[in-house]
Image (cartoon, grey):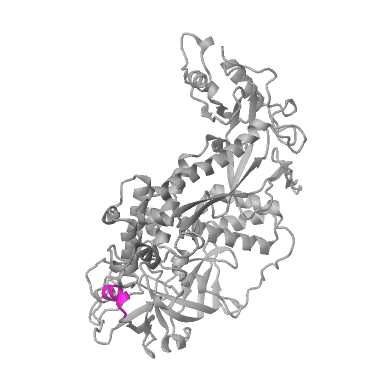
Amino acid sequence: MAAPRTRSADISPTSWNAESRTIEVVWTTGARGARFDWESFETVDEELDTRSTAVRLDRLNAGAPVLDTHRRSGLANQIGAVVPGSARMQNGQGVATVRLSDRPDIASIVSDIASGIIRNLSVGYMVHVYEIERAPGQRPLYRAVDWEPFEISFVPVPFDAQAQVRDAPESSPCILRPHPVQEYSSMSHTRHNTLGISRTADGQQPATEPAPITNDPVSLARIREYVMAASEGAYAQLTREDCNGIILDIAERGMNEHEMRETLLGILASRQRAATSPAGGGPREIVDRWGSGSATYENPNFHARAIEDALYARMSGRAPTDQARAFMHMSLVQIAGQIAERAGVRGVNSMAPGDVLNAAAWNRTRGFDNGAYRGGGYHTASDFPDLLTGAGQRFLMDMFAAAESPLKLIGRRRNARDFREISGLELSGFGTLSEVLETGEIKSGTFKSRKETYQVKTFAKMFALSRQAIINDDLGAFGDPIRVMARAAGETEASLLASFINNNPAMSDSNPLFNAEHGNLAGTGAAPSVATLSDGRLAMRSQKDLDGVTPIAAAPKYILSSPSYETAIEQLIATQLSANQVDEANPFAGKLTPLVDPRLDALPWYLFADPVNAPVLEYAYLEGHEGPRVEMKEGWDTLGTSFRVYMDFGAGLVDWRGAYKNPGAVVG
């Protein structure tokens, strides 16, 4: 079947048989595409051999399942089955006839397939033998010469652009060619070599075997190679700053190769989950976690998203999305009743309000769900408490962002994998690169764990929402405590960070953070002025690296103070240069960012460098739990619901070279 180089959305698959509910499909053409190989940690091209001798069709011809987007978590995700004996390889394509279910809950999906709206497919398979081709300057080619498909899925965007619903033989199909996108599906998850065989193109085993994994710590160069390779994956979600932090963390923990691989896999999985969680209350983030489907209220995902958007809009006072407007004036009990009716509960209109809430599944412990549990069958997408908790989580993050302290700007952020102590690396011998003479030896620098450590701890509080408040439609009884909890979470972070500055704690060398021995404390207190700022800048510029020779040259970026100096500092750094009075010119005009925090002691003021270049404070969240979280649990001994807000957060000092303190003086 020829593939025309045009796009057309109006060609219907004429092979659909409404009486038998069958349709002929092309489930693979062996399309080549990029994959990330988790065994070698490199990007490779994968291609499926479509010769009949290369494909094991037994499972398809035994009636393999037809799924909705590779979802295998429950029976509801199976929308049909391959007609036994219909799977075959024909002209380089995998062809089969599938029979779709007549269940009412998937009627809209079947209708879209029959009318040609849904026409893309993907196949889940396992590989038994690869032949590997390697050519200079090209990605390795992994050709599956013995592979076995075991399910077919209808998907929005396929990996194989020509895997589509098949038209009648006399017609030409509409081939949709999207930009190359790796499809996160069972194709990439289930692919494995069950025989453990690697072969070259000529069928011989490679001459060089992979190096065995040992318990020795991985070298810094090897760590960087693995992390940078993993970051190239389409779903890695890793920035260069992320990569540097991961490299640093693996190195300071002294991981062997196996531990490094396991850590990287965990990080990538966590980043992918985090990419689907809400970050600021906008509707776009929520669309991804609710899954696909038609934009109508008949689609349960669209219906649930609209309700959550409405609850969020009512809590936050923001304008509702278009789909949320239908629920803005419904009471909470009315919303719960509609959800219960859609779930199949009968007689909702004759129920008492409390019974309506129970019918809407108000009955178990919940946390905010980013979509993973819905797909796993733990609870439905339309449970009313889940929607209320999801809206509350979005509102919580909004309020938390508004309550954040400016002190976080002077700190370097990182993520922690667990609750163990966090340390860093101290590098020595890296001041300059050493010249390498002909046949000469390359000198090594060294790194060791620094002595300053801190750890992530859990902070939490609870509040209750009475049954009467829900029945009375008092959403403020839920939103107001969320607002207070968000401010409390922000205050927890700010108080901890301010304590390091106010208390001036001793560091690993037994000297306080700000101390004459560290060269970062003014000898005499004075208010901010051009002269005192100049003294502070000179002190920071004079700081040396661990070797005592190499200049750090940390330039001040922030000037930090209590409200006592706020007006004076704003006037000082806003003063512009005067061409006629050079001696009175202000060299700091526009060069410093003022930060004010009322938790700081009144008189001292501080200079801080950019934490990317010369960090002094560092703070961390538990991986995958950035910021506060809200969870709920129905009470048994009382007629109400308990909510808890918790946060996994930690902070500590890491160095003194990027900061300067002046004890200050009373402004006359």
In this rendering, would 667 be left or right of 335? right
The question of residue 273 being in magenta is answered with no
Query: What residue is rendered at 62% in x and 60% in y?
Result: 263
- Depth check: 442 or 576 in front? 576
Q: Position of residue 227 (x, y in %)?
A: 59, 56
- Which picture quadrant has residue 61? bottom left
Q: Quadrant of the N terminus?
A: bottom left
Residue 453 in view here: yes
Q: Is residue 330 above or below residue 447?
A: below
Q: Estimate the x, y position of residue 250 in percent, counting from the top left.
A: 66, 54
Query: In this picture, which residue range is highlighted in magenta?
Result: 103-112
The outermost residue toward the bottom is: 85
Q: In this orientation, does residue 90 appear?
A: no
The answer to whether residue 481 is above or below residue 597 is: below
Q: Is residue 6 left or right of residue 447?
A: left
Residue 453, percent from left and from top: 70, 45
Main secondary structure of the magenta stretch:
helix
Q: Nearer the viewer, residue 435 or 554?
A: 554
Queried whether the magenta region covers residue 108, the answer comes back as yes
Toward which corner of the image does residue 426 lie, by quadrant? top right
Q: Position of residue 192 (x, y in %)?
A: 55, 75
